[in-house]
Amino acid sequence: MKIHVNCISKTTITILIYYLLSLTPTLAQNKDVDKDIAMYTQLWNDIVNKGEIDLINGTHFDTNVVMVMNPKNIVGIQGFKDYYQNYLTGFSDIIFTVKNVFGQGDQIAKHWSFKGSHTGNFFGIPPTGNKVDVEGVTLVKMKFGKIVQEQDFMDNLLFMEQLGLISNPENVEIIDSIYKAFAKRDMPTVLGAMDAKIIWNEAEGNSLADGNPYIGPDAILNGVFIRINEMDEFFVLKDIELHNMSNNQVLATLRYHLKVKSTGKEADVQVAHLWTLNNGKIIAFQQYADTKKLAESEEN
């Protein structure tokens, strides 16, 4: 898998954008620059939004056009075409927007956004169905009305997260804070970390699974948390270990130590929780548990 993008952080992109904006009052655009900007903007709109890949040709690009890459540049029109074909093949519902574009002499700077659904092969990555929404900056050199060099900058880590290839490292911290809040019975904090449409499933065979799937924080509060409080004299989570997974998932291995009010029985149960997050919110939960031990503790 090779995605040739110069990676910079979102903060760096923002700084670069504001720097470019600060230059605009002093950029004396002559007719050639205006013409280059108009051609360049329309060209990439037609290539990306309309899928007109054959516009990457000798009319608009220098024969030896260079795409500055790390670790190796792409040189030549065919290389450009092959590279961008991955985006047109890999994504559907594409919306490419040039948010700002400026020029001075033979230089053009473009601030852009790219949105799409990953429904096709993308640099060898099978379709995930995930949606991406990223921004970046492109620095361009022109010569005689043709593109001779481009260098793209974007938050590559965010792009990989949105594709589901890597997970946000903050996910573990979010789930850790949930367990700490639950230990304090701080339900507003626990529920506040959940997406409004979270899907929650208790392990099959668990008595609380009768409401599966619980949709939304209120359903979870009433169907799971309040019932636990009513059923158990105490309910403690212990030996919690968190494991960051791909696709923005976190696996928790832990044990329940509880005492059922109606039977007076205690249980120490092995459990696993699989959490799924999106943009810092929990969108799904799946419990795996030794339901035999749970059931025995509830039996008279």
Image (cartoon, helix red, strand yellow):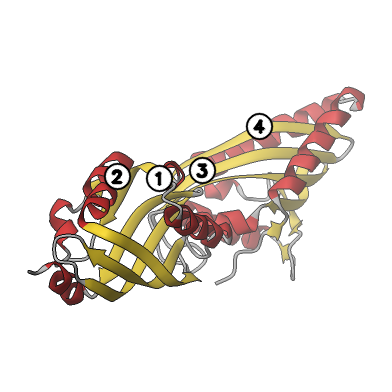
Q: Tell me the amino acid under the disc marked 4.
A: Lys
- Considering only vertical position in the picture, is 94 above or below 100? below
- Which residue carries the number 4 mark? 99
Q: Residues within 10 Å of mark 1 (few under 14, many from 20)?
A: some
Determine whether the residue tagged by mark 1 lies in a helix, strand or loop.
helix
Query: Tag 3 or tag 2, which sits nearer the N-term?
Result: 3
Q: Is 287 on the left or on the right of 39, as rendered? A: left
> Which element type, helix, strand or loop, lies under badge 2?
helix
Which residue is under mark 3? 115
Of 196 and 165, nearer the camera is 196
Discs 2/3, front: 2
* Label 3 vs 4, first from the N-terminus: 4
- Disc on res. 221: 2
Q: Are marks 1 and 2 in contact (CB under 8 Å)?
A: yes
- Among numbered discs 1 and 2, the one appearing first in the sequence: 1
Query: Which element is circle 4 on?
Result: strand
Going by the numbered disc 1, the residue's amino acid type is Met
Q: Residue shown at 20%/56% (left/top)?
A: 231
Which residue sits furthest left?
300
Residue that numbered label 1 is attached to: 187
- Whether residue 284 is visible: yes
Which of the image's four quarters has the N terminus?
A: bottom right
